[in-house]
Image: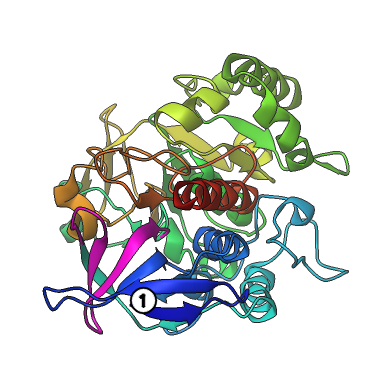
Amino acid sequence: MTTIKTRMGMEAEISSDWTGEPAILEGAIVIGAGAAGLAAAYALIEAGIATEILEREGRLAEPWHHRHENLHLNTHRDLSTLPGVSFPQGTPAFPHRSAVIRLFNDFAQTHRLPIAFGVVVEEIDFRGDHWLLKTSTGPRAARHVVIATGRDRQPFVPAWKGMKDFSGKIVHSAHFGRASDYAGTKVLVVGAGNSGFDALNHLSGVETGQMWLSARNGPSLLPKRIGKIAVHRFSPVMARLPARLADAVMAATQRLVFGDLGKYGLPPAPSGGASRLGSDYTAIAADDGAVDAIKAGRIIVVPQVKEFRHDGVVLESGQSIAPDIVIAATGYRTGLEAMVGRLGVLDAKGVPLFNGPANDPKLPGLWFTGMRPSIRGCFANARIQGAAIAGRIAKQRR
């Protein structure tokens, strides 16, 4: 039996395994050093639990480095912090991605978090009383594993018929680039969710050619601001409401601010914004100029995409349009199948069946965090879920 010290000065035991497997960390391994992973690791260490963070990339916030340069948070800076670290004075209400990158690095440095970079976790296996991890740097073992690799790890683009023959360009919204690059081009955005409206918000400030929005369902849509007030500031209150009441408040706000968007071809949302967060994990969209562009006719709402042809796109209505660029705002996948797919913990879309402090009693010690959207936003949710998981683990160890 080997004893190590945690950062908080607590002693942790690492057991030797008689089968030749690696020593078992009597604590937790956190997989992923995004907001959810960092917040969970901090909470675990604060609870006196020996913790190690494994990050596949060579630096923090790697996805944020690669997202489009116009990207800003849709959540307010005061509600998008991590424990003990906030955005510096003068940061805009909705911080730019560069400010988010700084926040991650400041948080890790302030709390001296034990992050091992460049470690890819390929598969995990339950060994009855601990978890064995197959990684790119060799096997590791721990009593608990917290998977925080993100719900938007892999951009997803449907396999549309004929898309390989399309003479235009197809990009996922994650690779939107600079809004100015779309000047003078005809653009089709596929998907009326949060990512689709984010792209349209940016494009509405550029002199593009005709724009189209292909929408299967209408979004739960809120303005980014009402007057000078950031709507996200009300999210803590909304999160405490029953889902049906929150749905009604959001629907009323949408109707009062935007009017009847059905007149412009936008289909109704299949259910309320709060309910969709819980049922199909659809995030609430934020408007910052796109609705005005729809009402002005700069953006035409059209039916779903049926297929691509060399010179255009055929819609389900039979109509053909000829965009130069198609932006697929078609969501993301977790990419967890290889790591945990055989454990039976994922749904048909690869989303974990449990999240936060909930877990499967048959697989003790396995936790997921940051895998579903929240009214509060990902940062606030990361703090809440991280603390809840740490509390559950600490209670089990007593």
Within the magenta stretch, is there residue 146?
yes
Amino acid type for the residue under numbered disc 1: Arg
In this rendering, the answer to whether 32 lies above or below 248 is: below
Q: Is residue 12 visible?
A: yes
Quadrant occupied by the N terminus? bottom left
* Image coordinates for residue 304, horizontal then vertical, percent: 33, 34
Q: Is residue 310 visible?
A: no
Element type where label 1 sits in the image:
loop
Give the quarter of the image for residue 232: top right
- Residue at 25% across / 76% down in the picture? 16
* Image coordinates for residue 101, horizontal then vertical, percent: 61, 74
In this rendering, the answer to whether 13 lies above or below 245 is: below
- Residue at 34% across / 51% down in the picture? 365
Give the farthest residue toward the front: 1
Assign the magenta stretch its main secondary structure: strand
Residue placed most toward the observer, 18 or 255: 18
Tell me if 119 is positioned left or right of 369 in this view: left
* Image coordinates for residue 248, horizontal then vertical, percent: 64, 15
Tell me if 42 is positioned left or right of 269 in this view: right
Residue placed most toward the observer, 285 or 163: 285
In this rendering, the answer to whether 28 lies above or below 340 is: below
Give the quarter of the image for residue 302: top left
In this rendering, the answer to whether 373 lies above or below 59 is: above
Which residue does the numbered mark 1 point to in the structure image?
56
Tell me if 246 is positioned left or right of 68 in this view: right
Tell me if 184 is positioned left or right of 250 in this view: left
Within the magenta stretch, is there residue 136?
yes
Q: Where does the magenta region start and end? A: 125-148
How many marks can you see?
1
- Residue at 41% across / 75% down in the picture? 55
Residue placed most toward the observer, 235 or 183: 235
